[in-house]
Amino acid sequence: SLWRTWARGAAASLTLEVIAPTHIFLGFASGAAAVSGGRALGVPGLAGSVPAMALAFAVASLIGWIATRQLVGVREGQVKVWERDINED
């Protein structure tokens, strides 16, 4: 039943990603989904150990965020560089 809590956390993070599309919550969702899957499959390191689950969540979230950043990150020409300030005239 603890894996369902992690699955709900992943769903909540995905909902936040839809509301505020910043690609940060997508990393948290992937981390929570990874821990949920690990708990559901009975991975021995995640069997009730809160520090192990927190570490797995942090590592999986970081990997998910990096992967998302590589796939949909800042593209060439996406950042606007201002050459002149409108108040300088």
Image (cartoon, rainbow, N blue to C red):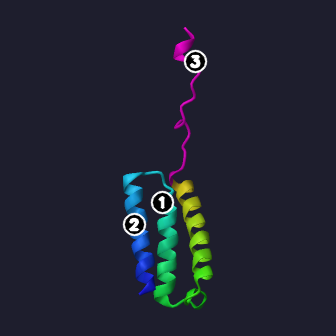
The correct choice, above or below, for 52 with respect to 26 in the image is: below
Q: Which of the labelled discs sits on residue 84, or is there none?
A: 3
Number of other residues with Cα within 10 Å of mark 3, as a class: few under 14, some 14 to 19, many 20 or more: few
Amino acid on which the number 3 mark rests in the picture: Arg
Percent across and percent down for residue 18 are 37, 56
| Rendered location of residue 89, percent (x, y) | 54, 8
Residue for point 54% across, 43% down: 75
Q: Which dot marks residue 5?
A: none
Q: Earlier in the sequence, mark 2 or mark 3?
A: 2
Q: Secondary structure at mark 2?
A: helix
Q: Earlier in the sequence, mark 1 or mark 3?
A: 1
Q: Is residue 10 magenta?
A: no
Q: Which residue is mark 1?
A: 25
- For label 3, the SS is loop
Give the labeled residue for mark 2.
Answer: 12
Callout 2: few (<14), some (14-19), or many (20+) C-alpha neighbours within 10 Å?
Answer: some
- Residues at marks 2 and 1, CA–CA distance in whole angstroms: 9 Å
**Which marked residue is nearer to the observer: mark 2 or mark 3?**
2
Q: Residue furthest top?
A: 89
Is mark 2 in CB contact (under 8 Å) with mark 3?
Answer: no
Residue at the (51%, 76%) spot, across then down: 34
